[in-house]
Image (tube, helix red, strand yellow):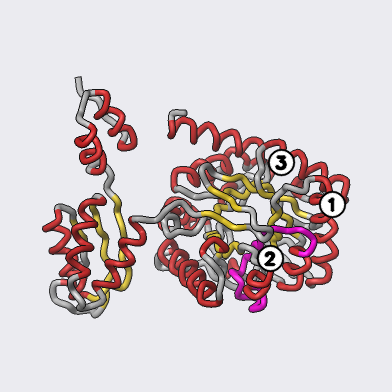
Amino acid sequence: MILQLPPNKVAEELKNVGTHLVGIEIMAKKTQIFPLKALKVRTPAANIIKQEMLSAGGDCAVPAMAVTGAQDYCDIVLLGTLQHYKRLCIKLKLTGYFGLDKLAAELEKILTFSKPSTKLADGRELHYEKTIVMGIINVTPDSFFAASRVSNLENIVKTAGKMLADGAEILDIGGESSRPGAESVSPQEEITRVVPAIKAIKATYPQSIISIDTYHSATAREALLAGADILNDITAGEADEEMAQVALQYKAPIILMHMRGTPKNMQKNTHYDNVVDEVTQYLLTRAAQLLCLGLKPEQIILDPGIGFAKDKVANLKLMNGLVALTGHGYPVLLAASRKASIGKVLGDLPPEERLEGTLATSCQAVYAGANIVRVHDVKENARVIRMLEAILQCQ
């Protein structure tokens, strides 16, 4: 009788059959193939990488035209274990041509990353040993999911308390709807909505962690002064150039989300040649720009922007390829809760009937190594995540 083994259980089974400890360490690494995609590689470099990966025992897929050099640049796919990549990096670093030494440095960085962390505005730190649940509290009259709207301070505090008790580690407060077609509101109106809510929650739950969902620097500043801990900007800090300066001044982390246009017109621009590549490149480039301005890696969180300037297929591809964002040293947030794509997949269901679909997206976040899920239903999502983590970790 022959049994299949899941790759993550190989080390345990090697131990069970009595393999020497040194052998376990060597052989367990051979079970983990890490597929990687390198973008815009010089074509001569692609051919060199192909040969070196084959010589190291791995493989590399290059486009058919790479042999003729018909194009100056191309994308390639690498297939190898950690040992294969280590051998490849040694060879590439010895070659100063075609940017191979820089590619080797980037490859080493990806393969040796440690778990990311987030430093809050007040100095506290978030460590992501488990997937963190962020609960949504909308102090708006027009958010797409009516049950997420909370209208007065007493109910806001009550809702916050229930979410915290149900397993939320972060509360996301929003004062402007960003649903497709939504009209913008002024910073002053937004401040009037969110600042009293933040103060009321902090007064009752001083250790709570609050994220302010805004792309206005004026709102961000007032929210941080009121006690908010994280900035959540759907424009990745591009709509208001002062947002990065606010993050710097108050040492606050910022969530950078991918979007095209504005909530009012974003669904008119949903074409991508490769949505996973394009969104990942945008967010990593934007993060690098903020690092140049003075922000630290622990101040940056990435969000692919499910539902923002994407159609159903693009959203599904982004969630399927979410692992492309993880592993770069930044925490990754998935915010798909009750969104339209879930309704479309399940037969045009309204927001009120999209809970089960949302739970599936949270499971995918765990599988992909995302660090935060932003959801309306804290208890249900927290329970399914904790159960899935227990299965994966056997503890």
Residue 317 pos. (x, y %):
44, 55
Q: Of residues 289 and 380, which is closer to you in this image?
A: 289
Q: Count neighbours of disc 3 (C-alpha within 10 A) and say few if under 14, some if 14 to 19, many if 20 or more.
A: many
Q: Residue at x 29, y 72 (%)?
A: 102
Q: Is residue 217 left or right of residue 326?
A: right
Sooner in the amino-acid sequence: mark 3 or mark 2: 3
Q: Amino acid at mark 2?
A: Gly
Helix, strand or loop at disc 2? loop
Q: Which residue is mark 1?
A: 200
* Residue 368 pos. (x, y %): 44, 48
Camera sees residue 338: no
Instruction: Give the residue type at disc 1.
Output: Ala
Spot occupied by residue 130 in the image (x, y as percentages of width and height): 53, 42
Q: Residues within 10 Å of mark 2 (few under 14, many from 20)?
A: few
**Is residue 163 visible from the viewing direction of this image?**
yes
Q: Where residue 164 is drawn, which disc sits there?
A: 3
**Label 2 sits on residue:** 181
Image coordinates of residue 226 in percent, x first then y, are 80, 61
- Mark found first going from the N terminus, 1 or 3: 3
- Give neighbour class at mark 1: few <14, some 14-19, many 20+ (Cα, 10 Å): some
Question: Do the CB atoms of the residues marked 2 and 1 lie less than 8 Å apart?
Answer: no
Quadrant assignment, res 78: bottom left
Q: Which mark is residue 300?
A: none
Residues rendered magenta in the picture: 225-243
> In the displayed structure, would residue 58 be above or below residue 72?
above
